[in-house]
Image: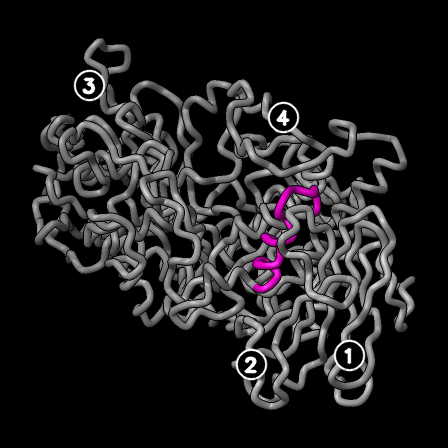
C-alpha cells in the first residue's frame, strides 16, 4: 500500500447510526456492518481514470458497525470497501483485502462488472479450489459505489392505497414491455421513462389494469457462466444492490426516471409493485465471486451448513441463502423495503421465494422474525405484500401458509385451469376449488377471498399462447441442453408443434386462450395477467427465458392480437360490473340469513348437481350470490351464473330460478368479439366455451 493511498488522518469518527454513505452538506458519513472483520478500509476512486486514490483505515467500530466521517466528500464521490480478516473458508470466513466490495447500502453504481478471475476471493485454477487465497486486486473489474445527492432522494408522495378486491395485476419486464413498441420513442425503449410513456399507460388503462408488477429492478450481476455463453440474466433475479435501481434501464433522466415512472403510473391510477429478491445474492456458492456481502462478513450475511461452514445452505437453488434471521441482515432488508416505499414511491412487493425469508433454524415459520418485523413496521404494514410461497429447500412448498397480510401466487390455480381445458382426469373437480379462490388453502386466520393471486401464465413458464402451441419446452437457446425450465406444463398443441397456418388449429388455439384467460378473471381471488398474453404473445416455446434479452422475450407489438386485447378488456370490465366475481369473503354454500339461500351452488347442465364422481366430467356450472358472511347491502349484488363446457357438443343449459329479475347472457368465450353478443335469455353454450349470465331487472341493478 503506497503512502498516497494511506491517509488515515482524513477520517474523523463519524456516526454508526445510519448505514451507508450520507452527505450532510459539508462531508459524508460512512457506516458499514461487519461483525467479524479485523479491519475495514474506505477506498476512494478517481471518476475519470478509475484509479484508487485513497485507502483509509476505518478506526472506529461501534458494536458491529465500522464508521467514519470524511470532510468535503461531496455527492458523486466514488468509493468502495475492503475488509481484512481471516481467510478461513472452513470456518465460514472469506475476508480478502484484495477485493473491492460494494457498499450494501449504496443507492447508485458507477461503472459495471467485468468478468475476470480477480473477482474471485480464491485463486482461480488452484487444485485447492476455494481454499486458495487470491492475491489479485479486483478493483479494476468492479463498479464503484457512489455518494448520492440527498436532494435526489427526497421522500415522495404517498401510495395509492387501492383495495385488494378491485385489483387486476399486470406482470411485466421494463425492457420486454417497451423494447419493440413502435409508439414508445426509440430513445426511451427499455427504460423506466419508456415504461411510463403514453403508449404503455394508455394500453394498461384500456385493459383495466390497476397495478403493474415489475420483474426485479434492483442492481444485479449476470452469472459468469451466462456471460461466457454470450447471454445475460435478463429477468434480474440475481441482485447485488438492494437500494440501487438497475442502471441498465436508465433513460435520459437517470435514477429520476424511476421516480417519474412511479408518479406517472400513480397519476393514471395504477399501482407499482416490485418483484424483490432478498433470498439470495449474486455471489453464488463457494465458487462464486466476492462482490460485497461475502467479503464484508460471509458468516453473518449467509446461512452456512452447520457442520461444513465452507459451504452454503442452498434453499434457493441459486447457490446461497441470505441469513435474514441475523439482525443486521434483516435490518438491511427492511431498510431497503422502506427506501423503495418512502423515497421511490412504490406501492408493494412480490417476494421471490418467500418461504426462504420465513425460514428459522428449525424450519419455516410465517410468524418468525422477518415476517413479524415486516408486518408491524409502520411504513410497510400498509403496502401490498405478495408471497411466492415456495423455495427448493426442505418443506419449501407453503401455499396458503402465509399471514393474512399477504396475497400469494397460486400455482395450483394455473395448473388446474390448464388441466381442465386440456381434458385431464379430475380437471373439473380441481377447477371447482380454484373458481372459489382455493378456499381449502386460504380460508383460515381471517384471510380474505382476494388472497389467491390467480394466473394462467407468468414470467417463468409458457405464455398463454405457448400453452396452446407447444407440448414440449424449447429451451435450447439457454445453453443447458433443454434441461432447464418446468417439465410439467399441462399444455397442448392441437396436433402441430409451434406455429401453424392451419385455420382449424388456429381457431382452436384462439378459443383455448380465451377460455384460459376468462377462467382466471371469473375466479374468486386477484387476477394477474402476464404482459403480452392479451396480445397472444409467444416465446417460441421457451418456458425459462431468464437469459434471453432479445426478441424471444420482447413483446411483439407488430404481431399483437388486438381482438384478443379487447376481449381481455371486456373481461376486466365484466369483473368490475359484477361484484359477485370479486367478493371479499369466501363462498362455501352457507345459508344466507336474509333469504335462506346458499351463497354458492353447483349445477350440471341439466339443472341437477354435477357428476362429481365422474373423473372425465367436462361440464359444470356455478351460481354465485353474495357471501353469507357479508353485509346486507353486499348480499343484494346481482347473481352470476357461469357455465363451463369443455365438451365437443353444443349444449342447452337448464338455468336455476333467479332470486330477482331475469337471467341475461353477458359474456361468451365462443365469441372473440363481445360486441357481437346478444344480451338475451339464450341458454345455449357452445363447445369449448364459457357462458356467463347475470340477473338484470328488478332488484338486480348491480349487474349494470
Q: Main secondary structure of the magenta part?
A: helix
What residue would you read off at disc 3?
135
Q: CA distance from mark 1 to mark 4?
A: 49 Å
Pointer 4: what residue? 474
Tell me the element at label 1: loop
Q: Pick whichever of labels 2 and 3 is earlier in the sequence.
A: 3
Q: Nearer the viewer, residue 662 or 171?
A: 662
Report whether 653 appears left or right of 432.
right
**What distance separates the C-alpha of mark 3 from that of mark 4?**
43 Å
Precedes in sequence: disc 3 or disc 4: 3
Q: Is residue 194 visible?
A: no
Residue at 57% over, 81% down: 591
Nearest-to-viewer mark from 4 and 2: 2
Task: Name the residue tied to disc 2.
Answer: 628
Q: Which residues are magenta?
A: 421-436
Question: Rounded to the nearest whole Å, what is the CA distance between mark 1 and mark 2?
Answer: 19 Å
Q: CA distance from mark 4 to mark 2?
A: 48 Å
> Of tags 1 and 4, which is closer to the observer?
1
Q: Can you tell which of label 2 and label 3 is closer to the viewer?
A: 2
Q: Secondary structure at mark 2?
A: loop
Residue 23 image position (x, y, % from top left): 28, 56
Which residue is label 1 attached to? 657
Name the spot of residue 563 as percent of width and height, x first.
Answer: 83, 52
Amino acid at each position: 500500500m503506497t503512502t498516497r493511498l494511506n491517509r488515515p488522518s482524513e477520517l474523523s469518527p463519524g456516526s454508526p447510526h445510519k448505514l451507508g454513505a450520507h452527505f450532510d452538506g459539508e462531508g459524508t458519513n460512512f457506516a458499514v456492518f461487519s461483525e467479524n472483520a479485523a479491519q475495514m478500509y474506505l477506498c476512494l476512486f478517481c471518476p475519470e481514470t478509475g484509479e484508487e486514490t485513497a485507502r483509509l483505515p476505518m478506526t472506529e467500530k461501534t458494536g458491529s458497525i465500522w464508521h467514519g466521517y470524511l470532510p468535503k466528500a461531496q455527492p458523486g464521490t466514488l468509493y468502495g470497501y475492503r475488509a481484512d480478516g481471516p481467510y478461513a473458508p472452513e470456518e465460514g470466513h472469506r475476508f480478502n483485502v484484495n477485493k473491492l466490495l460494494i457498499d450494501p447500502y449504496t443507492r447508485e453504481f458507477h461503472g459495471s462488472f467485468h468478468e475476470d478471475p480477480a473477482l474471485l476471493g480464491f485463486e482461480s485454477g488452484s487444485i485447492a479450489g476455494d481454499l486458495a487465497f487470491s492475491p489479485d486486486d479486483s478493483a479494476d473489474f468492479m463498479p464503484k459505489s457512489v455518494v448520492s445527492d440527498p436532494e435526489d432522494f427526497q421522500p415522495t408522495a404517498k401510495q395509492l392505497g387501492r383495495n385488494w378486491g378491485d385489483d387486476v395485476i399486470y406482470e411485466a419486464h421494463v425492457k420486454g414491455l417497451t423494447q419493440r413498441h413502435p409508439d414508445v420513442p426509440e430513445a426511451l425503449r427499455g427504460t423506466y421513462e419508456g415504461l411510463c410513456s403514453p403508449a404503455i399507460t394508455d394500453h394498461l388503462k384500456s385493459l383495466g389494469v390497476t397495478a403493474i408488477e415489475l420483474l426485479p429492478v434492483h442492481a444485479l450481476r449476470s452469472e459468469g457462466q451466462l456471460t461466457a455463453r454470450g447471454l445475460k440474466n435478463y429477468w434480474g433475479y440475481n441482485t447485488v444492490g438492494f437500494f440501487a435501481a438497475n442502471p441498465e434501464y436508465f433513460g435520459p433522466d437517470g435514477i429520476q426516471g424511476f421516480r417519474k415512472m412511479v408518479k406517472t403510473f400513480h397519476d393514471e391510477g395504477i399501482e407499482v409493485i416490485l418483484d424483490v429478491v432478498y433470498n439470495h445474492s449474486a455471489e453464488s456458492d463457494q465458487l462464486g465471486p466476492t462482490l460485497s456481502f461475502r467479503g464484508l462478513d460471509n458468516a453473518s450475511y449467509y446461512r452456512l451448513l452447520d457442520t461444513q461452514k465452507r459451504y452454503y445452505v442452498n434453499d434457493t437453488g441459486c447457490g446461497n441463502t441470505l441469513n435474514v434471521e441475523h439482525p443486521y441482515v434483516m435490518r438491511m432488508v427492511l431498510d431497503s423495503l422502506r427506501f423503495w416505499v418512502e423515497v421511490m414511491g412504490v406501492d408493494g412487493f412480490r417476494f421471490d421465494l418467500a418461504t426462504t425469508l420465513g425460514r428459522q433454524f428449525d424450519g419455516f415459520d410465517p410468524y418468525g422474525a422477518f415476517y413479524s418485523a415486516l408486518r408491524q413496521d409502520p411504513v410497510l404494514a400498509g403496502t401490498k405484500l405478495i408471497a411466492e410461497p415456495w423455495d427448493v429447500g426442505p418443506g419449501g412448498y407453503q401455499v396458503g401458509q402465509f399471514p393474512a397480510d399477504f396475497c400469494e401466487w397460486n400455482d395450483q390455480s394455473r395448473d388446474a385451469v390448464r388441466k381442465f381445458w386440456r381434458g385431464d382426469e379430475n380437471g373439473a373437480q380441481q377447477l371447482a376449488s380454484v373458481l372459489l379462490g382455493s378456499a381449502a388453502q386460504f380460508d383460515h386466520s381471517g384471510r380474505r377471498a382476494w388472497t389467491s393471486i390467480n394466473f394462467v401464465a407468468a414470467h417463468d413458464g409458457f405464455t398463454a399462447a405457448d400453452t396452446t402451441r407447444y407440448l414440449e419446452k424449447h429451451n435450447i437457446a439457454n445453453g443447458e441442453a433443454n434441461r432447464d425450465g418446468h417439465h410439467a406444463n399441462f399444455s397442448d398443441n392441437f396436433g402441430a408443434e409451434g406455429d401453424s397456418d392451419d385455420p382449424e388449429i388456429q381457431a382452436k388455439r384462439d378459443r383455448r386462450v380465451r377460455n384460459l384467460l376468462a377462467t382466471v378473471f371469473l375466479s374468486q381471488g386477484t387476477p394477474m395477467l402476464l404482459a403480452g398474453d392479451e396480445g397472444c404473445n409467444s416465446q417460441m416455446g421457451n418456458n425459462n427465458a431468464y437469459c434471453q434479452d432479445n426478441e424471444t422475450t420482447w413483446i411483439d407489438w407488430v404481431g399483437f392480437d388486438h381482438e384478443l386485447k379487447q376481449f381481455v378488456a371486456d373481461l376486466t370490465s365484466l369483473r368490475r360490473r359484477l361484484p359477485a366475481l370479486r367478493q371479499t369473503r369466501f363462498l362455501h354454500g352457507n345459508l344466507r340469513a336474509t333469504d335462506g339461500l346458499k351463497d354458492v351452488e353447483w349445477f350440471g347442465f341439466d339443472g341437477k348437481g354435477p357428476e362429481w364422481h365422474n373423473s372425465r366430467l367436462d361440464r359444470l356450472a356455478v351460481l354465485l350470490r353474495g357471501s353469507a358472511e357479508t353485509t346486507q347491502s353486499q348480499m343484494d349484488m346481482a347473481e352470476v351464473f357461469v357455465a363451463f363446457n369443455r365438451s365437443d357438443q353444443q349444449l342447452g343449459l337448464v338455468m336455476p330460478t333467479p332470486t330477482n329479475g331475469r337471467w341475461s347472457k353477458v359474456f361468451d368465450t365462443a365469441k372473440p368479439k363481445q360486441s357481437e353478443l346478444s344480451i338475451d335469455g339464450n341458454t345455449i353454450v357452445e363447445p369449448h366455451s364459457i357462458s356467463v349470465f347475470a340477473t338484470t331487472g328488478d332488484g338486480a341493478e348491480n349487474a349494470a
